[in-house]
Image (spheres, grey):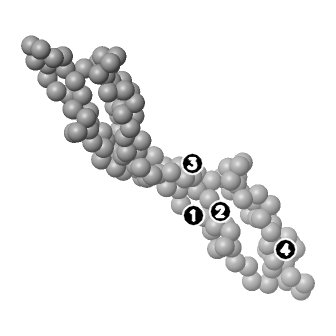
């Protein structure tokens, strides 16, 4: 078994090349799995040494797990609206837009079009639990 780096919210499992260790043998990474999802390491016994069953080479391979979304922490966003009055329609309260573990950008504040659009982006290691909705009409 080759040493692996556990999957995270953002990244799948990976081969820990620096953690590979062999006594009385050399090794070469045939495939680190970064593209294929399957790693393969070939070990060659030093002269005078053998692996089990009198083998001079040993291939270690395995599948790498995908990223684990269960490890992601939650991000959220909020776009508060100002209630309409008899003189003005509803509008976005630009000062109170907020993101928790997320950044945001106001694409359209709705002042001209009547519809607003705010794009939220979760920080690394975070994901939104549900769709915030990309645009709405105030």
Residue under the point 39% across and 34% down: 119
Q: Residue furthest right?
A: 47
| Residue carrying label 4 | 44
Cα–Cα gap, marks 3 and 4: 29 Å
Q: Which mark is residue 66?
A: 3
| Residue carrying label 2 | 15
Closer-to-camera residue (84/98): 84
Cα–Cα gap, marks 4 and 1: 24 Å
Q: Position of residue 46 (x, y in %)?
A: 86, 82
Mark 1 in CB contact with mark 2 (< 8 angstroms)? yes
Mark 3 in CB contact with mark 4 (< 8 angstroms)? no
| Residue carrying label 1 | 5
- First of labels 3, 4 by sequence position: 4
- First of labels 1, 3 by sequence position: 1
Cα–Cα gap, marks 1 and 2: 6 Å
Q: Which mark is residue 30?
A: none
Q: How crowded is the residue under tag 2: few (<14 C-alpha within 10 Å), some, or many (20+)? A: many
Residue 48, picture quadrant? bottom right
Q: Secondary structure at mark 1?
A: strand
Q: Nearer the viewer, mark 3 or mark 4?
A: 3
Q: Position of residue 11 (x, y in %)?
A: 55, 53
Residue under the point 68% across and 68% down: 17
Q: Residue furthest top?
A: 86
Q: Secondary structure at mark 2?
A: strand
Residue 129, picture quadrant? top left
Mark 4 in CB contact with mark 1 (< 8 angstroms)? no
Residue under the point 27% across and 42% down: 98
- First of labels 1, 2 by sequence position: 1
């Amino acid at each position: 078994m080759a040493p692996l780096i556990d999957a995270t919210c953002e990244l799948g499992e990976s081969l820990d090349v620096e953690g590979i260790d062999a006594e009385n043998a050399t090794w070469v990474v045939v495939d680190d799995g970064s593209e294929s999802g399957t790693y393969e390491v070939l070990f060659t016994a030093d002269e005078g040494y053998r692996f089990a069953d009198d083998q001079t080479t040993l291939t270690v391979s395995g599948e790498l797990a995908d990223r684990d979304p269960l490890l992601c922490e939650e991000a959220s966003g909020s776009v508060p609206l100002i209630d309409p009055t008899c003189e003005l329609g509803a509008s976005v309260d630009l000062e109170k837009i907020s993101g928790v573990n997320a950044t945001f950008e106001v694409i359209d504040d709705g002042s001209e079009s009547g519809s607003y659009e705010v794009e939220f982006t979760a920080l690394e290691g975070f994901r939104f639990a549900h769709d915030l909705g990309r645009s709405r009409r105030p």
